[in-house]
Image (cartoon, grey):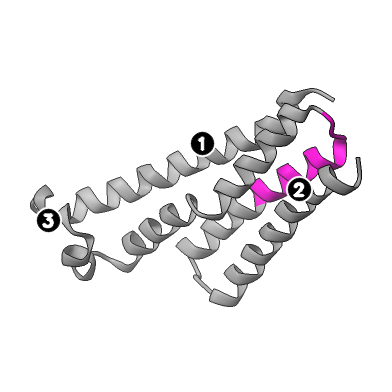
Amino acid sequence: MDQLALLTPVLVLIIWTFIIFLIMAFGRVSFMNNPQDAAESKDYRDHLPAWVNRTADNYNHLFEQPVAFYAVTLSIALINNFDSLVVQLAWAYALIRVIHSLVQLSINIVLVRFFLFASGWLIIAFMAFSQIFLN
């Protein structure tokens, strides 16, 4: 199987993270009078709309669990011993993270976010275990 097929969901998730960055930057710049106010996030957080803070939180979340996804996916691509199921799992993970972002930026129901978060970990774990125990 082609390594690009496995790495495309990684690249899509990186582009999604950039989109979230742009939304966060727009929100912060739009509601800040003085850029120096951003020197300490605790100092200006209470002065921003909730959607801007949720976007910033989501941006941070995209640098937490997805790092494990990136490491596992890149490792599998280097090993170059994977099948279409692993590619489908990588796409499922990327889709789950996009949905997680959309939930956090809109309805922000914590139990829905937690379900998506836990599902993401199950996918990452299965991808890793599949390389160790199923090959």
Residue under label 2, please give it: 128
Tell me: 18 left or right of 75: left
Question: How many angstroms separate mark 2 from mark 3 (CA)?
Answer: 42 Å
Give 130 or 50, whichever is nearer the viewer: 130
Question: How many angstroms separate mark 3 from mark 1 (CA)?
Answer: 28 Å
Residue kind at label 2, given as amino acid type:
Ala
How crowded pointer 1 is (Cα within 10 Å; few <14, some 14-19, many 20+) is rated as: few
Residue at x 68% of width, y 42% of height:
72
How crowded pointer 2 is (Cα within 10 Å; few <14, some 14-19, many 20+) is rated as: many
Residue at x 73% of width, y 49% of height:
92
Q: Horizontal and vertical percent for residue 132?
A: 83, 45
Q: Mark 1, mark 2: which one is toward the viewer?
A: 2
Give 60 or 29, whichever is nearer the viewer: 60
Residue at x 71% of width, y 27% of height:
78
Mark 1 lies on a secondary structure that is helix
Sequence-first tag of 2 and 3? 3
Does the magenta portion include 99?
A: no
- The circle on residue 37 is 3
The quadrant of the rendering that contains the N terminus is top right
Mark 3 lies on a secondary structure that is helix
Q: What stretch of residues is rendered in magenta?
A: 81-95
Residue at x 46% of width, y 61% of height:
105
Mark 2 lies on a secondary structure that is helix
Residue under label 1, please give it: 15
Q: Residue furthest front?
A: 132
Q: Horizontal and vertical percent for residue 34?
A: 8, 51
Give 35 or 129, whichever is nearer the viewer: 129
Does the magenta portion include 92?
A: yes
The quadrant of the rendering that contains the C terminus is top right
Q: Mark 2, mark 3: which one is toward the viewer?
A: 2
Q: Horizontal and vertical percent for residue 71?
A: 62, 41
Secondary structure of the magenta portion, mostly?
helix
